Amino acid sequence: MSGDGLSLGELAVELGCELAGDPDARVARVATLGEAGPADLAFLANAAYRRQLATTRAGAVVLAPGDADDCPGACLVHPNPYVAYARAATLLYPPHRAAAGVHPSAVIEPGADVHATASVAAHVFIETGARIGAGVAIGPGCVVGRDAVIDEDTRLVARVTVLHGVRIGRRCLLHPGAVIGADGFGLARDSEGWVKVPQLGGVAIGDDVEVGANTTIDRGALGNTVIGDDVRLDNQIQIAHNVVIGAHTALAAMVGVAGSTRIGANCMIAGQAGIGGHLEICDGVVLMGRAMVTASIRKPGAYGSGVPVEEVAQWRRNVARYRQLDKMHRRLRALEKGTGGGTPPEEEQ
Amino acid sequence: MSGDGLSLGELAVELGCELAGDPDARVARVATLGEAGPADLAFLANAAYRRQLATTRAGAVVLAPGDADDCPGACLVHPNPYVAYARAATLLYPPHRAAAGVHPSAVIEPGADVHATASVAAHVFIETGARIGAGVAIGPGCVVGRDAVIDEDTRLVARVTVLHGVRIGRRCLLHPGAVIGADGFGLARDSEGWVKVPQLGGVAIGDDVEVGANTTIDRGALGNTVIGDDVRLDNQIQIAHNVVIGAHTALAAMVGVAGSTRIGANCMIAGQAGIGGHLEICDGVVLMGRAMVTASIRKPGAYGSGVPVEEVAQWRRNVARYRQLDKMHRRLRALEKGTGGGTPPEEEQ
Amino acid sequence: MSGDGLSLGELAVELGCELAGDPDARVARVATLGEAGPADLAFLANAAYRRQLATTRAGAVVLAPGDADDCPGACLVHPNPYVAYARAATLLYPPHRAAAGVHPSAVIEPGADVHATASVAAHVFIETGARIGAGVAIGPGCVVGRDAVIDEDTRLVARVTVLHGVRIGRRCLLHPGAVIGADGFGLARDSEGWVKVPQLGGVAIGDDVEVGANTTIDRGALGNTVIGDDVRLDNQIQIAHNVVIGAHTALAAMVGVAGSTRIGANCMIAGQAGIGGHLEICDGVVLMGRAMVTASIRKPGAYGSGVPVEEVAQWRRNVARYRQLDKMHRRLRALEKGTGGGTPPEEEQ
């Protein structure tokens, strides 16, 4: 938190908000509408919480123009209140910055280049040829392979593995357990078994990318796996070799993307979706949770698949009928042709 | 193993079993009914294995009252033989306990508080403000962030990451690669791209919780992500920000729970299930493997979704028919109204 | 890369290829048909790229006999060009080998046995009783538990965890974040909550096995989890306790296999598939992506399940109809019996 907080006047200027209320009043923390007190900033960005507005005790509320009249106290009015809230929260809670310098327990091989303003924490290993840029923070237990490049102000939180030759841009944030640049899954089959196909490409990650905990991004077989600027990856995502993801695309947790698939810019992919290999997903595609994609998508829009839960007895009945769908289709055609009356076939019962 | 094992009399007392057999006979190990020898304790808790009972060579068998007459040798009779077996196995194989003390390669920042009876292994990093309770074991390569609290007798096996401010209760067991308290996936969108929403809450884990290998539990956006007492999480589970899980609920591997969802107590959720965000699952819900939950569940019971595999040709046919379901429905209505005879529409074929 | 590359004559001999072209010409790198230049070796193994053959500038192309006539330059002809390419690439890019010896920051407990030709990198921890064979490379940040055995020429890339008593064969390759031998998910329920069932077995991994990043393989409850020779596991796979996987079987990313299931040899399982517990999958089974297996498969062949994405409006309609399948079936029967005309039931609309 920034000292004793910020005045509403300062916040209004910083966030580009219109202020209704005392510009000298101060807020020091953020809280939900329901829990906020007079020293807290709250926000209303989701209609489901609007009923909490009338009774909030928040010192100020960030909200959209249409909600300002219903606010009992001070408010900061912005057409995109969630963005304004995010910026306010960042001002009130500036991210923890590690001090520059190399912890004595870190091992930096000769030939690695660590900028004087970078921070290298305990038990880090940096291999020869790696380049760590200005303002970079490498958290405890991270491994950075030979010739990898990590650009300015990127942060590896802890226990991140960046393998040889990977390039990571500026202002990225990689969470614990992420593995960047492991071998892609390349196998050739001969008569005696599998022959490993050397994975000779790299990974190129743009600027402002976030990579979630335990997410894995494999290196290319030939050429790079490419993650565009401002791509946001949640936890436990798997990105296979030679995948390309366009700028500003966001993937929620547990999504899998198979090899050589290209995903456009500004896509939003919900949790547990799976995208097959060698496909193209155009810009502006939204995939619902658990979506299963087995063909290219060339038209922007929202796509879904999968059937939500039912009580088990009903689920089992519908699964059984699903397995008879082709037969049901034929029975329907027979009825339409006038040949389907009489005794239904025994196996359908 | 505890020396030369335990006598059946000791076991009967410890487990609250009725003993049929020589109380001075000893068992030193556990084994399956099929593989056990005279020094081994076996158990029968699953009817599928009952046929092995008649021929077992086990020194003693833990079983239910109804099976005692069919046992050729000594038996320990308990109404819940699997629980009695689990307790017997724990007596015969007490968990390995690391010796108290801090390994010289561990780095403990000033201001961290490590109890004298705790064990801190090689290459551990503990940040300032963290509190490590009595009898806690922090295995090799773990990271514990600033102001995190780990209560008595909890064990982090190896390479676990616990980030700043996380609280973990007593007697918990966290397996390798688990990440507790990484940032939730909070993003606001403005015209130029994503704005990160600071994740300012924490994670509160109760007592007797088990967290599987490479499972991730994100910190709350505001307020905590909460894991109740005796919750059991298998490997590679993803728990998003502000999820609340009630006591005694168990999740099998690869389950994903999206943000702000509340799961009740005493639920059992099978592998690869996915639960959407902002939902409520009441107490006592059972979800089958791969279940997809997109709406709240307010009635206890078992729920399933998904269609099991078929041979590929049949699968493709049924998928094609599935995609025509809405049309099939209309054709069926037309027949019911007496207007559906004649030539079926071309596109249905 | 091996010096200034290899002559086509050497390659032809090493790979068992027929050479059309100058045996003294040299290639130093590999590249795709489209990007290769005169010093590069390219390959054609997938018909989708055949159109690039006529215009390639590659120094030589590895291809199948039927494609040789269309190659504008030198070619190396092999009946399985992908295998020949994989071997050529391995010759041109021999895997990086760490130097033998133990890094000073590594911690090796007394009673561990590390072969003089093994390489132990920074911040490795090896517990007492572990045996590290000749030519093994233990990368930075790995943990090897007590009494674990790692046989000749196996490589743990970085931050791999191998727990107590696990056995890993020869020439295996384990990628970062893999966890071998964590406790299986064994729980017994009594009236007060869960009782942990001690996981007393181990993990036995054969020779030539590859384990992907952040993949987890649990130890057996009693007896071992077994991974056969030449099994290939991609990233973020979960193998539960007492699973057995036969030789040469390959699993793509994010597959989950529940406890005690046996998978045969020479199976290929695509990404995000899920296989229930206590099942048998025979040799030679192919599972399509996202396949859901809830019963044993006793006949070799390809199996699939799941419905690919549709536009959201259509998806919602078909899901609604799917939930009425059992009713549709009854309406169809009524029509077939001649009792279904008239007014359709209200709830179907």
Image (cartoon, coloured by chain):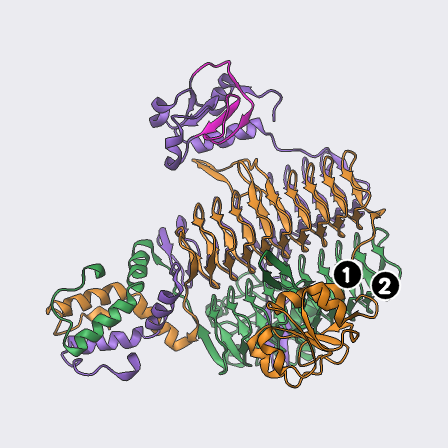
Chain colours: A green, B purple, C orange
Question: Which residue is farthest bottom?
Answer: C55
Callouts 1 and 2 close, C-beta under 8 Å: yes
Frontmost residue, B72 versus A72: B72
Residue drawn at 80 percent across, 70 percent down = C5
Q: Tell me if C113 is positioned left or right of C318 in this view.
A: right
In the picture of the structure, the residue carrying the numbered disc 2 is A112
Instruction: Give the SS element for disc 2.
Output: loop
Crowd tier of the residue under label 2, counting other residues whose Cα lies within 10 Å: few below 14, some 14–19, many 20 or above: some
Q: Which mark is residue C34?
A: none
Where, by quadrant of the figure, is residue A329 drawn? Answer: bottom left
Q: Nearer the viewer, residue B145 or C269?
A: C269
Q: Quadrant of the N terminus of chain B?
A: top right
Indicate the quadrant containing the C terminus of chain B: top left, top right, bottom left or bottom right.
bottom left
In percent of width and height, residue C234 lies at 59, 58
Which numbered disc flags the more N-terminal residue, 1 or 2?
Answer: 2
Q: Amino acid at mark 2?
A: Ala
Chain ID for label 1?
A
Mark 2 belongs to which subunit? A
**Residue drawn at point x = 59 percent, y = 63 percent:** A237
Task: Specify whether residue A95 is in view.
Answer: no
Left or right for C22, reference B302? right
